[in-house]
Image: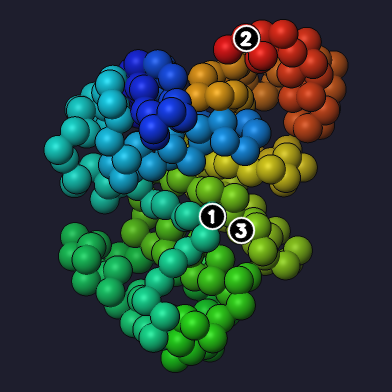
Amino acid sequence: MIAVKNITKRFARLTALDDLTLSFRKQECIALLGPNGCGKTTLIKTILGMVVPDTGSIEFNGQPIADQWMYRNNIGYMPQIGRYPENMTISNVFDMMKDIRKDHKNILDTDLMEQFDLRQIMNKKMHTLSGGTRQKVSAALAFLFHPDVLILDEPTAGLDPVSSEKLKEKITVEKDKGKLILITSHVLSELDDMVTEVFYMHEGKLVFQKKLDDLKTETGEEKLSKAVAKIMKANQLLAKDI
């Protein structure tokens, strides 16, 4: 569904993505992991067309995304920190997004809006909202248009435990529908029951890509965090050299 081919992106002397090649397929819930500064966010923004690579290409459903934008209608994106016009109400923000996405034909997924009780506070302005409520707005917007692909950057950050569980349940439901879901998170315990595959990045390169079941079998660990730690310990010299 998404093919990244020999992508390189530099910011001054920093190489954020270093000749990176990988692919994401339908019916997978993928954990995109790695330390801060490894290139995860740059990769996501490149897939979304927000960052233009220096070299290489990206294809969405077999078509190059360069100089295109319609493919993004198939992607629901939840940023780590949602930034919205501060004087808009929640209702204004949803109306704005629906106006931008005129192709939605009023067939909307409002499940998270209901789960998070957002309808009761739709007249609140964005500048009055807590970080957690902003996250709820971002989550509801990401799922709103029934996208085929969901890219969720630290989706549970700032959410209370109950809301976090509601979001995880929603992610699982969408995964079971066969959608491609890409998640970044530093809280690996949040991912144990959701992900099917793990991609680990380091300094702009892919260190490993493994099915979760294969990763557990290979390491003998049931928890994703322990399995990843064991793999990285075994690849310590490799990771330093990449």
Q: Type of residue at label 2?
A: Asp
Q: From this viewpoint, is residue 149 visible?
A: yes
Asked if marks 3 and 2 touch (Cβ < 8 Å), the reply is no
Residue annotated with mark 2: 241
- Residue furthest left as drawn: 67
The image position of residue 216, as x and y in percent, is 76, 20
The kind of secondary structure element at disc 3 is helix
At label 2, counting other C-alpha atoms closer than 10 Å, the crowd grade (few under 14, some 14-19, many 20 or more) is few
- Amino acid at pointer 3: Leu
Q: Amino acid at mark 1?
A: Gln
> Gap between marks 1 and 2, in whole Å?
29 Å
Q: Earlier in the sequence, mark 1 or mark 2?
A: 1
Which residue lies at the image location 64% right of the left edge and 43% below the top edge?
A: 185
Which label was assigned to residue 167?
A: 3
Q: Position of residue 182 (x, y in %)?
A: 50, 39
When asked about the image quadrant of residue 210, the answer is top right
Q: Nearer the viewer's eye, disc 3 or disc 2? A: 2
Instruction: Name the residue rendered at 79%, 24% in the picture.
Output: 229
Going from the N terminus, do you reach mark 1 or mark 3 first?
1
Q: Quadrant of residue 11?
A: top left
Left or right of 104, for residue 21:
right
Q: Which residue is mark 1?
A: 80
**Residue 80: percent from left, percent from top:** 54, 55
All told, the count of numbered labels is 3
Answer with mark 3 or mark 2, whichever residue precedes in sequence. 3
Number of other residues with Cα within 10 Å of mark 1, as a class: few under 14, some 14 to 19, many 20 or more:
some
